[in-house]
Amino acid sequence: MGSTVKANNIDIWYEEFGDKTNQTVLLIMGANANCMQWGQEFIDALIAKDFHVVRFDNRDVGKSTWFGKEPVINKILKFLPSFILKTLVNSIFGLAVDDKGKFKFSENTKVQYNLSDMAQDAVSLMNELQIKKAHIIGASMGGMITQLIALDHSDKVLSITPIMTSPGIQNDSLSGPTNGLLEAMKKSFVFNLKGKLEDGVVEIYRQLTGSRFPFNEADFREKLIPVMAHGSNPFAQHGAAVGASADRTNRLGEIKVPTLIIHGTEDAILPIDHGMALADGIEGSERLIMDGVGHEIPEQLLPEIIEAIVKNINRAAQ
């Protein structure tokens, strides 16, 4: 059973697994995703390697404090016919996406928080739980937060494993999302406006899944039930937080802890060049490149992934 603690002036919901006397692995999930997406199989595999594991809901999702709320206009739009909503969404995306398929972020955009605030959330949680140092694993946006903890709170870090993430989406030299994903995001937006949140998630993950392990909708929907039940906030401000946070490319050389970069070759939202740029920037980092894998952590590759993570963790003791 999870608990809620006040940390960094917000409520953070968390769960602990395994022997607390063992070294801690802190799991940080990605944008608009609560911590239930760290599956029990992943956690059990780490416990079997004698680690104490902590997963928690980032701000704005799950059972932690929510900032993003449904705009009043959405309550009106949801009653419009779908064909009108699709036209509106196409117009919005036309203004929000540049000619390279990347989302535009203005320096003048007002945000309620950024990734540094979310990094502080994680560190404050560690302090509340009396965890002096941890091995930190972050997926997608969670991998960006992981980088910031290693950069700005290095005294709290033993090793890091950023998974399917980026040193900064503002970097013009890195690829943008695929056209297929952008179209899926439009469809998902319409589903969200109609209150069909589960259908919206399915549309996105259909595109995020690579060709090596084809998307199984029935299986995905079954696994999605506890995730949605835990608390899904389609209006979380995570995207804005990512866009408002500075590119980290020029700071990567400051990261000195053992680092493992995990990335799939068919990632539709943060293509493989993002992972390569991250690995190139962190001296001595190891890489696990998963052929045919998208923006996902396939359970079929879990033994290989855990083995690589443990190997990286063991480097911290050398």
Image (tube, grey):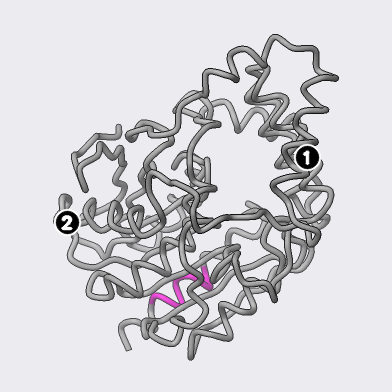
Residue furthest top as drawn: 79
Q: Nearer the viewer, residue 58 or 251?
A: 251
N-terminal of the two: label 1 or label 2?
A: 2
**Residue receiving disc 2:** 127
Decide: few, some or many residues near mark 1? Use Cα within 10 Å; few <14, some 14-19, many ≥20.
many
Mark linked to residue 184: 1
| Horizontal and vertical percent position of residue 210 | 78, 55
Q: Residue at x 28, y 75 (%)?
A: 154
Task: Give the foreground label among 1 and 2.
Answer: 1
Q: Which residues are magenta?
A: 307-313
- The number of callouts visible is 2
Decide: few, some or many residues near mark 2? Use Cα within 10 Å; few <14, some 14-19, many ≥20.
some
Looking at the figure, which quarter contains the N terminus?
top left
34 is higher (above) or lower (below) than 146: above
Residue 279 horizontal side relative to residue 298, left or right = left
Q: Amino acid at mark 1?
A: Ala
Looking at the figure, which quarter contains the C terminus?
bottom left
Report if residue 63 lies within the magenta region: no
Query: Toward which corner of the image does residue 85 lie, by quadrant?
Result: top right
Q: Amino acid at mark 2?
A: Asn
Q: Nearer the viewer, residue 128 or 17?
A: 128
Q: Nearer the viewer, residue 249 or 111?
A: 111
Q: Residue at x 71, y 24 (%)?
A: 191
Mark linked to residue 283: none
| Horizontal and vertical percent position of residue 245 | 46, 61
88 is higher (above) or lower (below) than 255: above
| Horizontal and vertical percent position of residue 127 | 16, 56
| Horizontal and vertical percent position of residue 33 | 51, 41
Q: Secondary structure at mark 1?
A: helix
133 is higher (above) or lower (below) than 80: below
